Image (cartoon, rainbow, N blue to C red):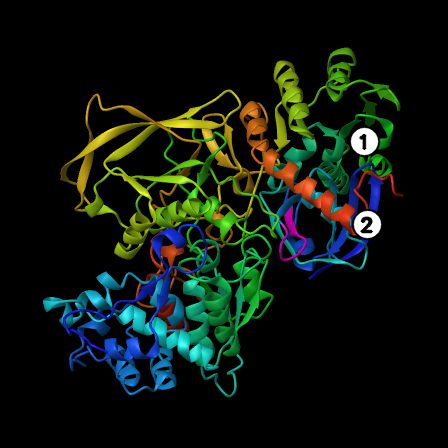
Amino acid sequence: MDVNVLKRVPVREQEPKVRATNFEEVCLGYNLEEAQAEAGRCLNCKNAQCVKGCPVSISIPAFIQKVKDGDIIGAADVIAQDSALPAICGRVCPQETQCEGKCIRGIKGDPVSIGKLERFVADTAREMGYVPKAPEKTNGKKVAVIGSGPAGLTCAGDLARLGYEVTIFEALHEPGGVLVYGIPEFRLPKDAVVQKEIENVKKLGVQIETNVVVGKSITIDQLMQEEGFSAVFIGSGAGLPKFMGIPGENANGVFSANEYLTRNNLMKAFREDYDTPIVGGKKVAVVGGGNVAMDAARTALRLGAEVHIVYRRSEEELPARVEEVHHAKEEGVVFDLLTNPTKILVNEDGWVTGMECVRMELGEPDASGRRRPVVIPGSEFELELDTVIMALGTSPNPLISSTTEGLEINKWKCIIADEKNGKTTKEGVYAGGDAVTGAATVILAMEAGKAGAKGIHEYLSNQ
Amino acid sequence: MYRITKAENIADKIFLMDVEAPRIARSCEPGQFIIAKIDEAGERIPLTICDYNRETGIITIVFQVVGASTERMSWLKAGDAFRDFIGPLGVASEFVTDDLEIVKQRKYLFVAGGVGTAPVYPQVKWMRGHGIDADVIMGAKTKDLLILEAEMRAVAGNLYVTTDDGSYERKGMVTNVIEDLVVNQGKHYDVCVAIGPMIMMKFVCLLTKKLGIPTIVSLNPIMVDGTGMCGACRVTVGDEVKFACVDGPEFDGHLVNFDEAMKRQQMYKTEEGRAMLKLKEGASHKHGGCGCGGDQ
């Protein structure tokens, strides 16, 4: 295989026109030859910057070396020391701002495709029947983990490897959290990837009890006093979807991205053989510019709609991963940038008919350092639509904080927890992920899950 | 899996089931609800809790067949099981957490319409369990659609039954009974709790507002997860948008925007209609013939 060391080995993808009509995975990943060629570009730096860019500090040059050697199981073992969910991270991490953003190759040319290599290792090892090593016996100490999303699964996996008896309590009927209800099939296949990684966590000895809404079915105090758990990790995720507060938002045809994605991903509304309905829409506006907005837009597109992303800042400020924006554009999503909705237009029966918007321009930088969008006077116009999807983020769910005595929250209603070890204001209770930080990324939740496992291990070792 | 220990057809298209769900039975309170999912492909269906037994771990649900999913649910028999049964969800009725001495001083009027009798029953039972006699109005279209009458009689103070067509006891709407009790008989109520079809709750609230009786209603909007995540169940209460699943399902009825809530309930009518047709088609194919019944 010919390799220009300055250029990354391109990864095969489904053709944009074809994939815009199906829910199959967009990116097809590397084969062994491609992976080894790409691995050959790694300089194996002594003071590897990529590892510093990784929230869970995977020994990146070491696993890439194993790929060069053709030892894929060996590579999987290296990754497993730090990550329980490599097939997922390889697909959804914002590598461009983490490991790949620090890669020395990136100074003159493309950085090494670390994400695609991680995915290759995880997928190939799984196909070869790879199972991460479980401890020989447990230490008899019980830990409860609330939520089976990326934070919970990571925390549970790490604690199980240390010998703890871990039970995850999941509120929904399927484990996986945002990996199952939020991120679509075409970006993260559920049966082939997510379920398999959850199976691997179970093989470490972790029990998962679904349909338990902690705060309602049982409280944290009951888990600790009545069910014998010595410590609890809260990884309950983000919460209630935000709306804009503009007129017409409760009209039929206005959805939160959470609802739209949950209907389609968790409840599989796109499949004829599932009962849950979805209003696909013919002309859809998605308000927002993050990964969730891109996911909702590309889902609506696949359900047959013309889709517009409506975002009040410019392309540069889009918070979504670069790859997601690129894919959305390729597939035909229209970007109405520097545009802000002011009112949703509704007919007599209560259905959406359009959206009134204004044009924006960028003014001085605000507290976040991003240039603040300002309304251009007299720029009002109408977009004709039948569906509006609000992808504006979430605010924390009060289910747990309001039912747990001594668990303090901050002014944004997020659970207060120490970043280093997940320690909350209640003894024996640790927390991490979106429940602590507000909506963020899968890998940051995993980092918090790892920190929580470390904190719980220290706490229980000193008892 | 959550085993069904009893399944009964208690009125036309209305079914009662006992389901083994010990975690829920241990922690639920009047006013809360559950979500049931029949099987892998099923919807998450929010249902009110009709009764619970902390010792046996049994939750009793009552539901009406309104679409394909509830139709499919009605086919389940004792010994079958739900794949998923989640709860308790929502906030318990206010009186559960209020100071009991204050609750005891209040005079309660419960108004139950149709299948809404099911969620009213555990509230009235709770009252009786705490030594409070509450007046109850039960309404149905016709005698055959009246449910849980004997059960309600056993726990209510005064029970007033009315049917729209006069086929049993009083004739007329529940609002006629409220007017009769308050205006003609001069009864005083501190709180009214009205649960039933949206249109009934709307008219009860218009009347109680006029009569000056604070009124609580229980809403059953469209939901997906039921834990606050999707926002499908949003409802306007006063100037605020609330999520029925985590802020409710019970709200101050005088502040609820019923017209908007009723429009939102229509959102999936087309899809539901299609699903019902498909289900009926499938069922008729199973039975052979075109489904018109001419072959039977």
Q: Position of residue B149 (x, y in %)?
A: 84, 35
Looking at the picture, tell me which residue is in the foreground, A236 or A346.
A346
> Dot 1 corresponds to which residue?
B157
> In this picture, which residue range is highlighted in magenta?
B34-42
Q: Position of residue A138 (x, y in %)?
A: 52, 83
Residue contact between numbered discs 1 and 2, judged by CB atoms under 8 Å: no
Q: Which residue: 76% across, 31% down?
A: B114
Q: Chain of mark 2?
A: B
In the displayed image of the protein, which residue is found farthest to the top?
Answer: B184
Q: Quadrant of the C terminus of chain B?
A: top right
Write down the quadrant of residue A217 in the picture: bottom right
- x and y, in percent, of residue A360 in the image: 21, 32
Q: Quadrant of the N terminus of chain B?
A: bottom right
Amino acid on which the number 1 mark rests in the picture: Gly
Q: Marks 1 and 2: same chain? A: yes
| Spatial CA span between label 1 and label 2 | 49 Å
Q: Is residue B119 visible?
A: yes
What chain is tagged by disc 1? B
Q: What residue does disc 2 label?
A: B287
